[in-house]
Amino acid sequence: MSKRILLVEDEENFGSLLKNYLELSKYEVTWTKNGAEAYSIFMQNDFDLCILDVMMPYMDGFSLGEKIAAKKNTPFFYLTAKNQKEDLIKGYQTGADDYLTKPFDTEVLLLKINALLSRNGNSTDLPEEKDTYQFGQFEFSPRSRILKHSTAEKKLSPKESMLLDLLCRYQGEIMPRDVALDTIWKQNDYFTKRSMDVYVGKLRKYLSLDPSIKIETFHQMGFQLTIV
């Protein structure tokens, strides 16, 4: 089923273009043009994600975000022209999951949406696990934690194995950072993020035996295992 997005944007042309773009990307979009109407619609329906402008009539986006955060566990982020540091801080203080300023790159917008929707899902939404993975010159078995190459064999630590397993499940797509943190570390804070970066570095070192394999970093989004 298509994920449902509540889009709150009072600028007519921009709102119409963004709604059409998101629908072409296979999302079901409800578009409203003021904060008060948006809150009423939000309370009467279930949405997977809300995208909020800040400067709107009747109820501004920050007030709307606070109400959303207080009522339901629905992820939301701001998409706004307000780009001052104090605006960004206020946005996160209302409970927002992210903050994107205009003008923006549409590919980045879709990556943020995908990351938030993946984070909000449960473990059954993860790509299917396999007994073994064949990629490049490697064979990897998550159960035995063995990473095999024609010239070497490595027994991975539990966290290394779980992280490589997730990267393999998402191969060719971005593995959301928050999915890995919630699945492996069971928490999401500054220290666990730094810890995960260290483990990604270890995996890159192990996989360097095959130069066609890359683990790419997408800032604030996640990581992608690719074969080039």
Image (tube, rainbow, N blue to C red):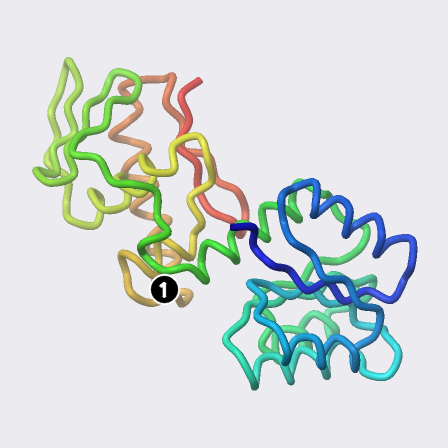
Residue type highlighted by circle 1 = Phe
Q: Quadrant of residue 106?
A: top right
Q: Residue furthest left?
A: 144
Placement of 177 over or under 182, stated as above or below: above
Residue drawn at x 81%, y 64% is 9
Q: Quadrant of the C terminus?
A: top left
Residue drawn at x 80%, y 55% is 102
Residue drawn at x 58%, y 77% is 95
Placement of 34 over or under 213, stated as above or below: below
In x, y percent, where is residue 53?
A: 78, 67
* Towards the viewer: 145 or 192: 145
Placement of 28 over or under 70, stated as above or below: above
Q: Secondary structure at mark 1?
A: helix
Placement of 159 over or under 57, stated as above or below: above
Q: Quadrant of residue 137?
A: top left
In x, y percent, where is residue 120?
A: 45, 62
* Towards the viewer: 79 or 129: 129
Residue drawn at x 47%, y 40% is 174
In x, y percent, where is residue 82?
A: 81, 66
In x, y percent, where is residue 130?
A: 21, 35
- Residue with the mark numbered 1: 191
Say left or right for 144 vs 50.
left
